[in-house]
Amino acid sequence: MERFVITGGPRLSGRVLISGSKNAALPIMAATILGAGQSRLENVPDLRDVATMAKLLRLIGAEVRREGHGLLVDTEHCSHPEAPYDLVSTMRASFYVLGPLLGRFGRARVSLPGGCAIGPRPVDFHIKGLRALGATITLDGGYVLAEADRLKGARVVFDIPSMGATANVMMAAVTAEGTTVIENATKEPELVALADFLVKMGAKIDGAGTDRIEIEGVKSLSPADGSIIPDRIETATFLLAGAITGGNVDIAGCCPEHVSAIINKLEECGVKMTLGGSAIRIEGLERIGAADLVATAYPGYPTDVQPLHTALMCIASGSSVISDTVFPDRFTHVAELNRLGAQIMLEDKVAVVKGVEELRGAPVMASDIRAGAALVMAGLVARGQTQISRIYHIDRGYERIEEKLSALGAQIRREGK
């Protein structure tokens, strides 16, 4: 099993180029099902999760091949509207194919999802939304069975914003008869990117990026070409990596407006940043100040970055209180950070972090993508050597993270190939 070995200490310095967004690429790959033929996607990150989605599309009948930094997806001969357990159980985003399969074929059989162990994430909202559009949905043997002769537009109201449910309902509704209105929709940039791609395919969508999306159904969609937006979570990761090491890092090819909550929080900690176009320069401090955090839905502070902020607070001057309203149980990283010498108390789903002078290297284990990234960050400043196992979790969400960090001066290597 592969692992990362990190010797902490060096301050990061240099330029890093941000990859395409995993959380935008996956639903857009699923959306290609709706237009029979060839779609070309540029700036697609080379990640384990992208490979899993490509494998799933091939099982459905698509041809998927990598061309440089992009993908060619040909869905002309898709004919098997099923997503099996062995794939969906490893990546929750596989569930994105439910809406497109139902929209194109009028039926779908998709396994209930798995993915990261960060607390319960039910698919009730997906099912509720598709039923509102007229789908008959049953659960059988761990699979969602969906059928509809022709979906019909409807008003769908979510109790809380959900990226997955909003995307699935939107992809099903674009070819439904009549108008669909989604209330309390997610506002995430990745949802906007998906809507933009669907519009290129011929969909009629208004309001993406707000809490009310209106969709006028069309008879069919056509293939389209598109480019994946920069990954805002990777952008945040390198911002916080620069901050935790007290380094000076130029982050290129990003969208600063997508990470405004992270920028604001780092400024609260005393970190200086310069924004310009598609770049951010971070100038680190000897030791940053502490800052409380509540992770919320976009445009609030992302839950995916909460574990990294927790790692940053471990060496901050002072104490901080951290909670997560999106995934309240998302604190599997706490025990592993404490193995590195952090002082974190977890009580009633709230983490209280007392900053320490230094962390100490130790063997630790990644439990999910972002918890793994938090351990990498801690390892960058921990005295001595940190060994992180189960890094296949990290590979699901980060493209060559060890190579990018090494180019900035980090002492990190991958072992066990």
Image (cartoon, rainbow, N blue to C red):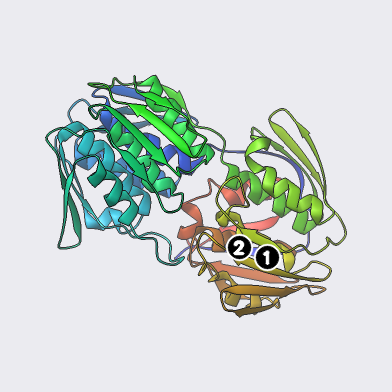
Identify the residue at image location x=61%, y=66%.
323
Extreme residue in the right direction: 286
Helix, strand or loop at mark 2: helix
Residue type at mark 1 is Ala
Q: Would you identify the image quadrant in which residue 133 lies? A: top left
Q: Position of residue 412 (x, y in %)?
A: 65, 58
User: Circles 2 and 1: CB distance less than 8 Å?
Assistant: yes
Q: Quadrant of the N terminus?
A: bottom left
Helix, strand or loop at mark 1: helix
Residue type at mark 2 is Pro
Identify the residue at image location x=37%, y=35%.
181
Residue located beneath label 2 in the image: 307
Q: Position of residue 257 (x, y in %)?
A: 66, 36
Identify the residue at image location x=68%, y=36%.
256
Asked whether residue 417 is in view, the answer is no
Q: Name the residue nearer the viewer: 82 or 140.
A: 140
Alpha-carbon neighbours of circle 1 within 10 Å: few (<14), some, or many (≥20)?
many
Q: Position of residue 18 (x, y in %)?
A: 61, 38
For the residues labelled 2 and 1, the Cα–Cα distance comes to 6 Å
Image side of residue 264 versus residue 300, left or right: right
Identify the residue at image location x=50%, y=61%.
391
Q: Which mark is residue 311?
A: 1
Q: Position of residue 109 (x, y in %)?
A: 17, 48
Asked whether residue 290 is in view, the answer is yes
Image side of residue 411 versus residue 78, left or right: right
Q: Which mark is residue 175?
A: none
Identify whether 188 is placed above or below 392: above
Q: Name the residue nearer the viewer: 230 or 16.
A: 230
Alpha-carbon neighbours of circle 2 within 10 Å: few (<14), some, or many (≥20)?
many
